[in-house]
Image (tube, grey):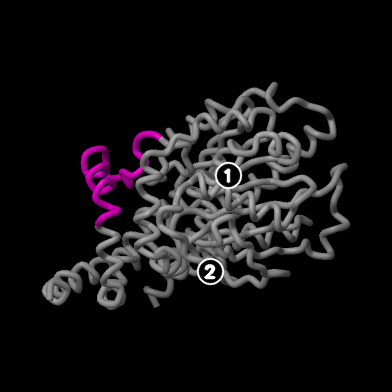
Amino acid sequence: MALRALAPLGAAANLVGERVVRARSGFRSVDAPDGWAHTPTESLTVNTEDGVALHVEIDAPETASRSRRHVTGRMPTVVLVHGFALSMRSWVLQRRALIHEGYRVVSYDQRGHGRSGTAALASCTIAQLGRDLSAVLDATCASGPVVLIGHSMGGMSVMSYVGQHPDVVRDRVLAVALVSTSPGGREMTEFGLGPTVGRVVGSLGPGVLTRMSRHAGPIGLLRKVGKGVQDLAVQRWAFDSPVSTDLVDLVGEMIFSTSFDVMAAFLPDIDSLDLGGDLGALTGIETLVMNGAGDLITPASHSEEIVRRVPGAEHVVVEDAGHILQLEHPDVVTQQLLMLIARAQRAVAEGIPVSSKPRVRRTVQDISKKRRVEKARASRGTDAAS
């Protein structure tokens, strides 16, 4: 009854949302003209210590790229860990680029996300995600160097893992990238709404999401009626520059395919998170920290805290970028990841102590995307005039 009463209001908000999203997006050529589908070399299931089945995919390097390995030493396996309410699909563009450059890539859906199994809600903690990452590494790359790359909650999973296994990290981890993430602290569940409103929403969030999960059918119908509102929310909290409607749909599909119960279960743990002590294990490891200048979920202050605790860490801030950097500015993220791995390989080959490096902070722009947006806007203007 309540949902039916809200229908007219939802329809009006939906219309406004559709108009705003059309004005800010609709640039198909801005993102991935080839789409986001990807076929892995191998798919497998990894069972965690508590019996959750994790969906894991392995990408072998492209044959033509193997001859391009010019750095001395064994090529590392790159492990990609996705964020809260997303899936491994959020890394698809980096997977393509990395295998083209000659790297073996491992990706997986975290517990309760994507195609992985649903866990007991009490196990939805960052500490458990660190143990899940350990299980994936044991199953897919039990030996040899690895590069760990985590986005948002995936970055928390990586930080949790390095705190749990400092000896393994010292012996095997060549480099780490922490993208749009946080070791914990203030603003963790403010959602860019400011300290007063944000904390109220954050504290109410778990209960609201749990109640919504009991009405999955009606909520599903409401989503269809209110897609404009859904898209507007994705545009606001995921991005800070024009993106295609296809990309908004992709992110919306990942988010709203995640169980409300799972979201609710993780929020209290994320809200009370404190991984600062785990970051000491990254001393001596080549580390990249990235964030978007317009990120409303994990603002720049969270990245700065990681850099403060990791000697020699490189900090890259991307202008006109929101929370889901790897999809909004994929070329910039991929370039920075490849540079990270090359620096780490060079440091090993030349015996350069990473901890002796000065901290470097750079602000970068995605010039290529700016040009694509301008071209798309000009094309839309020409079409409208004709």
Say above or below: 377 vs 318: below
Q: At 51% across and 51% down in the image, what residue appears?
A: 325
Point out residue 1 in the picture as x, y percentages from the top left corner. Answer: 12, 76
How crowded pointer 1 is (Cα within 10 Å; few <14, some 14-19, many 20+) is rated as many
Q: Is residue 379 visible?
A: no
Left or right, 295 with respect to 36, comes to: left
Q: Amino acid at mark 2?
A: Arg
At numbered mark 2, what does the secondary structure look like: helix, strand or loop? loop
- Relative to 88, residue 370 above or below: above
Q: Which residue is mark 2?
A: 115
Residue 336 percent coordinates (x, y) = 64, 44
Magenta segment, which residues?
185-207
Q: Rounded to the nearest whole Å, what is the CA distance between mark 1 and mark 2?
A: 20 Å
Query: In the rendered structure, which amino acid carries the disc numbered 1?
Result: Val
Image x and y of residue 211, in percent: 25, 63
Label 1 close to label 2 by CB (< 8 Å): no
Q: Which residue is mark 1?
A: 158
